[in-house]
Image (cartoon, helix red, strand yellow):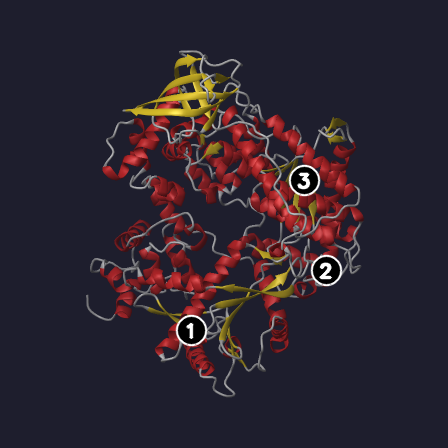
Amino acid sequence: MDALDLYMTVQADLTGRAQPRREVRHLHLEAAPLAVAVVQMASEPFAIWGALVGTDRTSPTLMVAPEPRNADIAFLAMGEFGKLLGDLIDRAADGPREHLQRRDGSEYTRCKTAPQLLVTNRAAVSLLERLGRRMRTAGYGGRIEVPEHVNRAGAHLGFYAEMALRPGSSLIVPATEALKRHWVTGQSAFENDHLASQLAWHDPELLEQIDHGVLGGMDPVNLSGGAAAERAETLPMGVLTDPDDDNGDLLAAVMQFNAKRDGRTDRRTVRRLGRGIGDLLRERALDAMWAALWVAYDRLASLPEGEHVEDRWTSDRSQFTKHADYVRGGGRMRSVDSARRAAMLLADWEDAQQELEHGEFLDDRLAQVGEIVAGRAICGTVTKVDREQFDLDKRGKPTKRRPRIVVQADGDFGLPLGTKLWWSERPSQTGALVEDLTVRGKRSRITLKVVAGVTGPLPEVGDQVMFSPYTREWHSQPYLPPDLPWTHVSADEPTDAGDLEEAKSLDEVLASEAVT
Amino acid sequence: MAGSLDQRLENLRAGFDTVRPNARTIAALRDNPGCASRRVLDAAGIDKAKLAERLGHEGQEGQSRFALQRGDRFEKDVKANAFAVAIDLLRRDGFDLDAVRLLLLRDLYPIDGTGDQDVMLAKRAEETRTAILDMARAKPDSYNLVDGGALEWDFGGAIARLETDGIAWRFKDQIRVVEIKSFPLVDGRADAGKVGATAWQGAVYIAAIQDLLEANGMSTDLVSTELILMLPRNTALVPTMLKVDVLRHVRTLRRLLAGQDSIDELVAKLPAGLDLDLDGLDEEQAKDRIAAVLKAIGTSYAPSCLESCALARYCRARAREAHDPRHLGVEVRGALAGVPTTERAARLAEGSARPRTEEKDTAKLLAGVHRVLVQEGLV
């Protein structure tokens, strides 16, 4: 565990308030992200039951599949959601682009904007992924018919769910995770997966904005984060409604809806008869989730943006452009990655992880603390700079200039001699090897041999400096053999079976069951 | 203390509400093997949710009927026409099956609140025992599939009867345990957490069958440790199967149980006269009494308890009050190894307390952070 996180967690537990683990924001925030508060029915993990969706916090669009276990009704809501998402993506893809050139001279473009999704937590990302899986393959066998934009939106959701795994990506922001990256609370990671509960540690007063009355009249000022979180936990913040609501009003409303629609699944009937269920879902879950999303957004927006965030958002826009062009050109997504794609993806994520760590470290003094304490970065005072040092050739003649810098620092360092470190003032230019390290009591004396940027500026005696392993280097693509080795060839290539699965609908059976 | 263990557990319960433990209850052991209270309460069949309610920390215990409907519907599909779908899946996977002879204990002895539930469960347990032993001996014409079985589980000296979800099925050469679950297997992958939880439940069933075989002088190899899961495939409810080897889980369960104090020793920690008899006590007195029982036996809170134990919220509140690092999660607790409270951790960080030997490493780390934060003007 990172030493800073540990320290701050202790402070959070004692003060009853969240503590910062970062000074600046390490993710990009769009001015108007597409916020999605969504719940599923406990019996149907592959459909929207209800969702509030929109880019304007004051006027979300409500989408409801009052009986999501019926495929026709489920696809009405999924189609509506798919349309909204697809339009947003088309607008970005058809909008202005940057024209760029590759090293080999070929040209390519990058969209200037990309839609950003804001959801409550990882469970919501998983639900979107499941919806995408169903929407992508729906209708391929002809058992049900769905408009093409549904298939395309399915591919978009698959893309966004995948980008949730790419380190440093801001294309989809699960609010709980984004908050966790910037603050620590006095509760466990498991409890922090509940958005309102995590926000309770930031300020119990925020809960009043999420659900008026959830504090039950307790004074938020004197309330500890833990006590406020306990109240907040009563609000559904994942993708499921409260089981007690399910067994009470919601079950009754669904039964009534099914009785009244009498087998009909047309849009008008569903909309007219399903209104009550939509209202109930809002009142019992979606309204609070929607409010919590924007409270979290405001918390994140209150931090100034880190310098390297822009670079990562550019990379996000590139990924988005590639995806949008592929899907709009008729490309389909495989449900299971080929061995080749999986290898490429992992390599890309590893690079992205390095880039993120580099950026966070260089942008953020708090991110540096843990590294310094762990002895992975040197932070101290320059006591000597000698530019007139050279490597010698066999005959003892000086060849390359190799200046030496001596740094005095507190603490000890677990750096093997020969480790390459970068000056944090010029992290991509000035690099040095650890040549000598002596520890005297609580202080260390480190001699660095400058091997990169030797003619450029160097620190001066008396300067406070930091040298760390963080830099930006070019990472190669992995070597992949032209033919897959037999270990990576699957005997039965997976097939996309969508239509067969739609052959089963639950509602006929369940609708007839009596309410107890 | 006098009397048999059962008698002493009965004394502790003192008429408090009971609840039947299930395979999930036992599998929860692996989440937090250190909690003595949970083991004793489970062994005594005490309703922890009711205790939590009396303590003023009731949690959400209910299960959504929508979720139950999905499970029921899927199970019905798999079991329809004398397990036709299940047999088909197994045959396609290469299993050589005899014609099934079903023992459907759920139908024979329903536990639905109508009859005496304990009697029903006892009957089920008896039938399960006979059927599994016959199966193991490959007695001709004996049942080769038991659904709704009840098994006996040794909680460390206290025997409890459990209703199982799993199915015991004799194939040609071995007894197999089959669990039917309604979480999906999408493109060959299922939720790791859910598969894990099911694996633990299946392991409880398999371990109990092993015990039964061993007690009757038969080889434990007669039951396979490869659990068979029947799950919906992809986005609808078309069944498919997944095999999971739970040998590791069975061993871990046994090791966890063997490493524990016996229930006998734990109950012996209770002072004479301390039990859960709450008759005539007011709210506060009842709370105090329950708290005293839990304290005497001992608890060990971890955030994962929130998922599996009704008393978790009570234990969390106490851990928070005491600034016990346990409530911050295993990672923090591990990192603060040796430091009993966060208050002490803060004092070590500021250098206002001298670290004991076991605290030195942690203290150095925390003091390091404090020093750098001060140096950089961040606090």
Q: Amino acid at mark 3?
A: Val
3D distance between C-alphas at marks 3 and 2: 26 Å
Residue B352 percent location from the top left of the image: 26, 27
Q: Nearer the viewer, residue A413 or B318?
A: A413
Q: Which residue is mark 3?
A: A53
Q: Are marks 1 and 2 on the same chain?
A: no
Q: Nearer the viewer, residue A44 or A494?
A: A494
Q: Amino acid at mark 2?
A: Glu
Q: Which mark is residue B171?
A: none
Q: Which residue is mark 1?
A: B209
When the figure is inspected, residue B274 is found, relative to residue A37, above or below; the finding is below
Q: Which mark is residue A502?
A: 2
3D distance between C-alphas at marks 3 and 1: 52 Å
Q: Label 2's element?
A: helix
Q: Label 1's element?
A: helix
Mark 3 or mark 2, earlier in chain: 3
Q: Are marks 3 and 1 on the same chain?
A: no
- Of the 4 image quadrants, the one containing the N terminus of chain A is top left
3D distance between C-alphas at marks 1 and 2: 39 Å
Residue A139 percent location from the top left of the image: 77, 55
Residue A411 percent location from the top left of the image: 34, 26
Q: Label 3's element?
A: strand
When the figure is inspected, residue B362 is found, relative to residue B123, above or below; the finding is above
Disc 2 crowd, CA 10 A, few/some/many (<14, 14-19, 20+): many
Which label sits in the foreground, 1 or 2? 1
Q: Nearer the viewer, residue B212 or B151?
A: B212
